[in-house]
Every structure is written in structure tokens, then in C-alpha cells.
Image: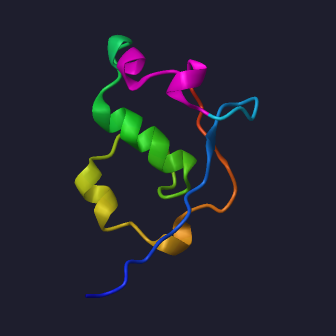
Amino acid sequence: SPEPTFAHVPLVVDANGRRLAKRDGAVKIASFREKGYQPTAIIGKLAYSCGWVPNAQPIHPKELVSLFCWEKIPRESVTIPLSE
């Protein structure tokens, strides 16, 4: 069988450079839903933060599949803007 390919993905951090992790009390997706964010808006913001799309507009996950490219995965930590 073919040997699997492995890759490292960047650490996701807040504006202060602290990693986002549940055990550290990081913001949860549910809190964005409670504030009225649509799933496509959250996905758009994340895709923009990672440099996959040119702006933070809402986007459907199916649209991102065709944009995926390993070379676009940032090597440095990714800062996710948690407030709007």
C-alpha cells in the first residue's frame, strides 16, 4: 500500500500570540453562532486569516476545496481575529 504523506500545519494563535486551545479557555465556535455569525462567515474569516482567499467574505466549504494547495499553508503561526 502507498506510504502516507504527512504535513505540519501552523499553530493558531490569538492577537497576543497565545495558542487557541479549549483547555486554555479559547473562544469556541458556538460563541460565534450565539452572536449570529453564519457558518460561511466563520469559514470565510478563517480562510482569509490563513491566506487562502483575498478577503474575509462568507464562503462555502465546497468552494475552498478547489482553492486548496499545500504551498498556501502558512509556515508561521496564524493569528485569528476573534472580534469584528
Residue at figure coordinates x 31%, y 37% from the top left: 40
Q: Which residues are magenta?
A: 20-32
Instruction: Tell me where residue 19 sits by quadrant.
Output: top right
In the orientation shown, which residue stands out farthest toward the bottom? 1
Is 51 on the left-hand or right-hand side of 2?
A: right
Is residue 76 rendered magenta in the image?
A: no
Instruction: Tell me where residue 38 sits by quadrant.
Output: top left
In the orientation shown, which residue stands out farthest toward the front? 1
Q: Is residue 40 visible?
A: yes
Residue at figure coordinates x 41%, y 15% from the top left: 31
Give coordinates of residue 25: x percent, y percent: 56, 18
Residue at figure coordinates x 39%, y 34% from the top left: 42
Instruction: Tell me where residue 43 sits by quadrant.
Output: top left
Residue at figure coordinates x 54%, y 67% from the top left: 72
Residue 25 or residue 36, whichever sits in front: 25
Q: Is residue 22 above or below residue 73?
A: above
Residue 37 or residue 70, whichever sits in front: 70
Q: Is residue 34 above or below residue 69?
A: above
Residue 11 or residue 69, whichever sits in front: 11
Quadrant containing the C terminus in the rendered view: top right
Is residue 30 rendered magenta in the image?
A: yes
Give coordinates of residue 65: x percent, y percent: 30, 63
In the orientation shown, which residue stands out farthest toward the top? 34
Is 1 on the left-hand or right-hand side of 52?
A: left
Give coordinates of residue 1: x percent, y percent: 25, 88
Give coordinates of residue 47: x percent, y percent: 46, 49
Give the image's coloring scheme: rainbow
Is 76 on the left-hand or right-hand side of 31?
A: right
Q: Is residue 83 visible?
A: no
